Amino acid sequence: MKLEELLFNTYGFTSFRPGQREVISQILEGGDVIALLPTGMGKSMCYQLPAHRLPGSVLIVSPLLSLMQDQVAQLKKMGEKSVVAINSFVKQAEREKIWDNLASYRFIFISPEMLVQPFVKNQLQRIRISLLVADEAHCISQWGFDFRPDYLRIAEILPVLGNPQVLALTATATKKVTDEIMAYLKLKDPYVYTHPMDRKNIAYDIKRFEKPNDKIEWLKSFVQEFEGPGIIYAGTRKKSQEITELLLEMGLRAAYYHGGMEHQDRIFVQQQFQNGELEWVCSTNAFGMGVHIADIRHVIHFQLPTSIEGYVQEVGRAGRDGEPALATLLYASGDEMLMESLVMDELPNRHEIEVVAGNSQESKRLVEEGIVRETAYRVISYWLSQMTAEETVARIDMIRQEKIRQIDKMKKLVNLAGCIREYLVGCFDQEVRDKPVNCCVNDGLNYEVFEKKKQKYQKSELDNWQNRLNALLPLG
Amino acid sequence: MLFEELVISIMKAVNLERTVSSPFHLIKGKKSGQTIQDIGYYRLHPYFAVMPKLDKNAYDEVIQSLFARNLLRPNEQVIDLSEAALGMKIPPSKLNGWKYRGNEILFLNRLSLIVQTLSHTSQSVYSFDPVHNAVDLQAWVKEYLVRIDFRDPGIAGRFKKELHDSLGAANVAEENKMMLMQRLTGLRLSGLTWEQIAAGKGLHTLDVQLEVIETLHAWLEVLESGDFPLFSPLLNGVVQRSSLTESAERTDKLFKQGLSLDEIAAVRQLKTSTIEDHFVELAMNDPAFDYTVFIPQDLFRSITKISAQRNTKRLRDIKEMLPQASYFQIRLALAVKEDIS
């Protein structure tokens, strides 16, 4: 059967999106693959379809719980029934059931920390795994913007599973990171698919201000002139709430979204955005995953992101429908200092390393008593398992240097006189071909294509519970 | 009932005898001996565990506002309500926390998945993003839907009618039923966040959350007593079978097998103080509880007498008058006394 036929018979799609065909056919030929595909370009299809041809199960290592839940939900939505997620939130009784039926699942999602547990390893060893997928594979990079020590241990599990094929997926990776992925996962001559990072329909703008408050004033006039849907990345939870309040006062349809909210409320904000009931969502970087909205017209960064990779990923949520979209970065003098201290504070310091190294027995207590931060502890304990305390200090210092380079890249972006598009794409070792007419603020930007269409939103008026019930269940 | 009314109701009952943080533990449903026995002493059953996720900062803000408006008088030790607060008229509430213990959320979660599914399928849409991703909850709803043959439009209609009739009969304000309905979603109809509902009403989010819980309690009461065959499976596991906490129940079992307090503590590998808490809970819930195993008859009478004369339930006050009594004996005697009278 031809691949197109398999695609149509399985999911009802008539054609592949760019890159999918190449990646899938390489997998079916038995090779290892690294695929660099932007988010929203159908990354998961790269393992979904092969799963229908391969003899064993597909094991997907997924670094974030929320991401895993979303992937499972999306797969089920596409009609895949044989899906299971194994993470620390699965209750004991449920786990028993999962182990009993493990071989019967076509898709097994697992968190990296579960993957390395001896008991889990034994269970996985019992069944046939045809393909191991390392999702968000850039997390493997110790230099990367979200390094996950547990991810390095994927390499340990491969021989245990009888060395299955590997598919490493990521949306953002420089050449350096791709090399690391290859080395750590011990990939043999993998096929590397690199999708062009450049998104032609996204135009880039940077607004520079003297005082932080100027950003607010600019935003106020912007949202009156231009129409959403749009995401405003606010930096902090507090800021996301403040901006939302401001927009609501202006009579705009806005809501905030951040990790401090009740889960159900977060779902509701996503629903509202998806149903077109909201024009603006003001958010921390928690918003994005699980949001499948094609017509986002604006992504506005109210604060400086901490890395180019993170910035590009967030901007990439705009204009999935191919229509013009605008990415606006707001900068006020001194913002880079704030960002720098944020990034540097995250890293483990010498004191923390020495305390953990000297108290390996009581490490848990150190975290509980707040002597060592939990995130720092995870990183430190990984490196201490690999090397001495002194070497760890040196290693963290190297990571610090790399972070400084990332910050410098961000600073450079803010002060850039040349083409923003070329700069961003260059950060991923790629080149811009066929520069679009509407490119960036430094290279000519026509705002007219984004202007407000003056559409009136019709708010449904449901004034009592019986009416709302009738709208929910419009039956007889 | 508004959140502040809830706090003041509890404070009125424990005025001058408990700290300002004790209502917080009660509302959250803390299963400590102190909280559990206070429920019995002060008849606070309706308010137990009505908001298990209550945030301490949010609670503290409310307390600060009570101080600022002189409803609470400055007092480092205990709750000290002003005349104005003591005189506040608080409407009767339908809260029934001791019975549902936070499980009403299980009912709501089931309901919201069922309504979301019926809303889509009855309008011929068969794919949507479920509002809840928990595997066990989804499995429960799936099994339920298949069992009732949900694709039959007649069944969906009957489900709607049962919802309409039973919620209609619930004895709470109509606008509170709307708040509950706004937490449900359907095809092209999103749910509203607590804050959005609160903003529309000019209320605090805590008020809205509490009103929804109260509406659920009132509704569950209707569902339990009436004939709603499609809804009755939704109540499974929602209504507390026994009024005891699970741990106290296990202690009770061992006690009935003839084990002593110390033996139970040893067997269960728990502190004796924890087991003591369980006995206090048992005494509170079981009118036939035989306290004489733990307290001589005359000591028991002395304790209850002093408590009545001095109009106090503060252990320290009673202990001062009766140094020979242990704190456990005092707590136990107070728990028993309430249930006999």
Image (tube, coloured by chain):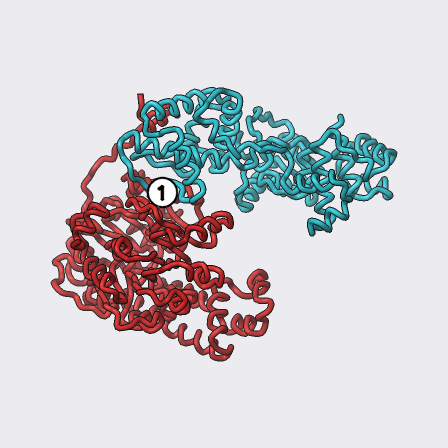
Chain colours: A red, B cyan
**Residue drawn at (47%, 30%), measured in percent from left and top?**
B233
**Residue drawn at (16%, 52%), measured in percent from left and top?**
A4
A471 displayed left or right of B24: left
Q: Position of residue B72 (x, y in %)?
A: 63, 37
Q: Looking at the image, which is closer to me, A231 or A196? A: A196
Q: Position of residue A225 (x, y in %)?
A: 22, 45
* Amino acid type shown at disc 1: Val
Residue B234 visible, this angle: yes
Question: Mark 1 falls on what kind of element?
Answer: helix
B303 displayed left or right of A113: right
Q: Please determine whether, in this image, residue B102 is positioned above or below residue A382.
A: above
**Circle 1 residue:** A269
Residue A284 visible, this angle: no
**Residue drawn at (67%, 30%), measured in percent from left and top?**
B43
Dot 1: within a 10 Å radius of its alpha carbon, few (fewer than 14), some, or many (20 or more) residues? many
Quadrant in the rendering for residue B152: top left
Instruction: Give the mark count.
Output: 1
Chain of the residue under label 1? A
Q: Position of residue A255 (x, y in %)?
A: 35, 43
Q: Position of residue B69 (x, y in %)?
A: 58, 37
Q: Please determine whether, in this image, residue A180 is positioned above or below residue A274.
A: below
Q: Looking at the image, which is closer to me, B195 or A411? A: B195
Quadrant in the rendering for residue B88: top right
Q: Please determine whether, in this image, residue B202 is positioned above or below residue A308.
A: above
Quadrant in the rendering for residue B78: top right
A102 displayed left or right of B275: left
Image quadrant holding the C terminus of chain B, namely top right
